[in-house]
Amino acid sequence: MFKRARFDFDYALVGGGLQAGLIALALRAAQPSVRVAIVERETHLGGEHLWSFHAGDVPAAARAFVEPLVVRRWPRWRATFPGLDRTFATPYASVSSTRLHEVVSRSMAAHGDSALLLGAEAKRVSAHAVELADGRAISAGLVVDARGPDRARLEGRVAFQKFVGLELALSRPLQGDAAETATVFDATVEQRDGFRFFYVLPFAPDRVLVEETFYADGPALDGPALRASILAYAEARGLSVREVVREERGVLPLPVERLAAPSDAADAPLVAGYAGGFFHPTTGYSLPLAARVAAIVGALAPEHAALALAPERARVERQARFCVLLNRLLFRAIAPESRRNVLERFHTLKEETVLRFYALDTTPADRARILCGRPPRGMSLRRALGALTDDGSRGERGRAGERTGEGASS
Ligand SMILES: Cc1cc2nc3c(=O)[nH]c(=O)nc-3n(C[C@H](O)[C@H](O)[C@H](O)COP(=O)(O)OP(=O)(O)OC[C@H]3O[C@@H](n4cnc5c(N)ncnc54)[C@H](O)[C@@H]3O)c2cc1C
């Protein structure tokens, strides 16, 4: 039985990124009086991020707390490849880490018994306790570990989605469709370092984010070369760049082997966010899943949250298995310069299939449609068979004990 007085807080959220921020907002909406602590090692919540997503993927239960974070919404999005130019009339949106920091900080400050601990590094995390690097310790009815990707655990078992992005101020405003359409893929460009494409988000008629993105085998990014390449792309597309306002970069590990589920030992924290497997293994989209988790955890008393999250964890794990298989085919069976053919073919499929794939909600028929058909150019049949039969679980069994056997994680 949960005894509130035993603990400093009702919930301690470790890692103040996307997942922790959304849980904090969900808790404030559903249980306004609970005491919440957020432990973040940086001085700012959320890092330097833009989280974009297909707006329809956010569940109804989460819309009220996600909405104030949205910095821009588009009524449609577009994918262009050498042989395809397709626009999907479904909404797309972006949340920024700057907005997340503002909204969550304000919400935490309004509650006297809650604490936003910035510049605080967690050293050891267990079901009810967090030890900080500076020697402080806090206790909570439920500790949620949302510290993001654990790079050491992922070593050798991932490929990468990586990008450099420039936010550009324009001297000549965008007109018509160009100002209202999110270009999620412009893959008509020369292919190098794996699947290469540009991502173009018009935030205002005179403000556009252009990202050069890769689905690559390695994480390296050559900043100066990519900056020059983005500016050359902008010029070639007729964007009149007045100034570079902001730069961002990111490298997201995409699993090509199944990863161990988090520990369910009695002294283990509830692991959520990327570390808990709540992200799309192929596209990297995390916001809708993090919002779902937040809606579930936020509505429940600390002692019920882990059990209530179990069905969603199992659903995501089932869906993720298929995506990890696709990643293995994409990164291990298909020549890097031919990966674009796979993505192009995928975007020719029925709209519902494409949208359910992005939502991590595929049906068996969707999965058959995605996998069947003529093998894409550049696919090695021998390597494809190897990828299909090896699910990486041998490596997984060898390594699972490193994290899952030990309960508390540090
Ligand atoms: C290339 C790229 C593009 C992406 N694009 C999108 C997108 O468009 N849409 C989308 O939905 N997702 C996108 N993602 C994925 C998304 O950013 C992550 O999956 C998501 O942020 C994971 O949320 P999280 O809360 O688990 O981790 P994070 O948001 O990474 O937060 C983890 C936090 O924990 C903190 N932390 C870590 N260790 C400690 C410690 N010991 N003590 C205290 N604090 C700690 C970190 O500083 C960080 O703030 C992208 C990622 C990248 C890199």
Image (cartoon, grey):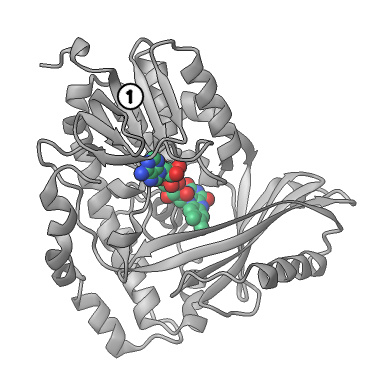
Looking at the picture, how far across and down is residue 178, in whole percent?
75, 52
Instruction: Identify which residue, 164 or 281, lies in the foreground.
Output: 164
Of all residues shown, which one is farthest toward the front?
A: 135
- Residue matched to label 1: 298
Is residue 371 in sight in this rendering? no
Tell me if residue 111 comes above or below residue 22 in the rendering.
Answer: above
Instruction: Identify which residue, 408 or 319, lies in the foreground.
Output: 408
At horizontal 50% and vertical 66% (from top left) the residue drawn is: 348
At horizontal 25% and vertical 23% (from top left) the residue drawn is: 140
Tell me if residue 324 comes above or below residue 409 in the rendering.
Answer: below
Residue 395 shown left or right of residue 72 in the figure? left
Instruction: Identify which residue, 8 or 24, lies in the foreground.
Output: 8
In what quadrant of the picture does the N terminus appear?
top left
Q: How many marks?
A: 1
Q: Residues within 10 Å of mark 1 (few under 14, many from 20)?
A: many
Looking at the picture, how far across and down is residue 45, in whole percent?
50, 36
At horizontal 54% and vertical 20% (from top left) the residue drawn is: 106
> Of the residues shown, which amino acid type is indicated by label 1?
Gly
Tell me if residue 85 comes above or below residue 78 in the rendering.
Answer: below
Is residue 267 in sight in this rendering? yes
Residue 139 falls in image quadrant: top left
Looking at the picture, how far across and down is residue 341, in whole percent?
50, 77
Tell me if residue 20 comes above or below residue 226 in the rendering.
Answer: above
Disc 1 residue lies near ligand 1 with CB under 8 A = no
